[in-house]
Image (tube, rainbow, N blue to C red):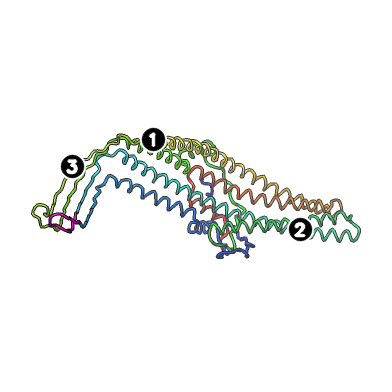
Amino acid sequence: MHLFSLMHSRVTFSVCLLATSMLGSVVNATNLDETYKLAQQYDSTIRAAEYDYESAIQRLPLAKSAFRPQLNFAYDASRNEQRRDDYGTFDDQQFTLTLRQSLFNRENGAIVDQARLGVKQAEAQLLAQQQNLILRTANTYFDVLRAKVEVDFSGSELDAIARQKEQAERRFDVGLVPVTDVRSAQAQYDLAIAAQIAAKNQLQTAVGAMEVLTGSRPETIAALATDLPLVAPDPANAEAWVKLAVEQNLDLVAARLAAQTAAAGVSAIRGSRYPTLDLVGAAQAAENELKDPIRGRDLKGGSIGIEIRMPVYTGGRIKSQVRQAKADSNSAQQTLLSQERSTAQQTRDAFRGVTGSIARANALQQALISTRKSAEATDAGFRAGTRTSVEVLQALRDVYRAESDYAGARYDYIINYLSLKAAAGTLNANDLIPINNFLVEPGAQ
């Protein structure tokens, strides 16, 4: 079953961003899908990955060009001065056309293999960056929602504490409560103001991160539906996801190709020890101004033959290059091993994150119900004189914290599930669509 197969529910409320002081272009209400599209157009990291891929593509025809005919034209002109006899000053011109075709070159063949692997590696890295952009977009988007929830909850807490403070002051005036209740309410009120300032600052920071990612700042941002289904991963086994990740994780695929490319580099250096075989043809024409029937005639000619070259002694250069290439290859192998281990661990962590966030969200939902009932009972006791205002304020704080934690757990669930799919190498932009369907449409009330 797909993670977000249920897409029939909607909520009709939006979250306003209190960030009017931020710089940058301002857009209307946005949702997750729109944010991702803006990030695709604006983000410099994905642009750099695309250019790296284009560069890698060009390395293959560049490597193959060594096996294609090489045609060169040369023109030489000179002025000569002969002081003996009667020749004096005269001009020489020489035209040369050379054609070279490689018949055997083991080093260049290995370089072509390297280039092919390099293209595949760059493609895997580009796809990995595209997945990374999806994750960064989701994290940035829900960080804004998370910060806005904290602002809302801190505001609600501040309002409740202010009412409780006023009530404690009135009851103190008529002698129903001691002064300690008033002072405690004042202290809680001051702390609530500080918490709200911190929450607003965090919201500004989150909105700024979205602006860095997308180049724009939304006026409003769609919120997450309260009835988002929390579906367990399928398959419901961490090791099954690890097996899939070992095969498809894009960072691991890129590391595997990097190791193969480094191994091909060793073959390329070793190939330089072997002889090369080229077919070489040349055509020449020479002209000068001498009128002498023997020395002044124009010359034309051509040649064709086989050229064999083989390095005999290079001062230890090739031997050193082979050792260097082996070290690079061993390093790439160790990097691959490290990536395999980290991929397996990341996949297990993401799997536990999904299952843990589901359990936590369900527990927090129940806790929210319980804290609300407890707050109602505490308030009734306060009115009856059996509870203090400090207990009422603590009960309210428990309610607001449970609401904030419950919202955060649902955001964590989404991020963990996207991270799990990224670890398995199956994350793509379509995975944002079901999530987006559980966000309010722009302009909805």
Majority SS type along the magenta span: strand
Q: Earlier in the sequence, mark 2 or mark 3?
A: 2
Categorize mark 1 by other alpha carbons within 10 Å: few (<14), some (14-19), many (20+): some
Q: Which kind of residue does numbered mark 2 sit on?
A: Ala
Q: Left of 198 or right of it: where is 42?
A: left
Q: Residue furthest right?
A: 175
Q: Magenta includes 84? A: yes
Image quadrant for the C terminus? bottom right
Q: Which residues are magenta?
A: 80-94
Return the mark for residue 226: none
Q: Residue furthest left?
A: 293
Q: Left of 364 or right of it: where is 84?
A: left
Instruction: Give whichever of 52, 363 is nearer the camera.
Output: 52
Residue drawn at point x = 61 percent, y = 63 percent: 22
Q: Give the CA distance from mark 3 to mark 1.
A: 32 Å
Question: Residue 201: x and y, percent?
Answer: 66, 58
Instruction: Give whichever of 374, 424 is nearer the camera.
Output: 424
Q: Left of 383 or right of it: where is 403?
A: left
Q: Which kind of residue does numbered mark 3 sit on?
A: Gly
Q: Which kind of residue does numbered mark 1 sit on?
A: Val
Return the mark for residue 160: 2
Residues at circles 3 and 1 in contact by the CB criterion of under 8 Å: no
Task: Quickly name the residue at label 1.
Answer: 322
Instruction: Give whichever of 280, 153 is nearer the camera.
Output: 280
Residues at circles 2 and 3 in contact by the CB criterion of under 8 Å: no
Which element is circle 1 on? helix
Q: Please name which of the two marks, 2 or 3, marks the residue nearer to the observer.
A: 3
Picture quadrant where residue 324 is located: top left
Question: Residue 373: x and y, percent?
Answer: 75, 50
Q: Give the CA distance from mark 2 to mark 3.
A: 96 Å
Residue drawn at point x = 57 percent, y = 54 percent: 140
Task: Quickly name the residue at label 3.
Answer: 305
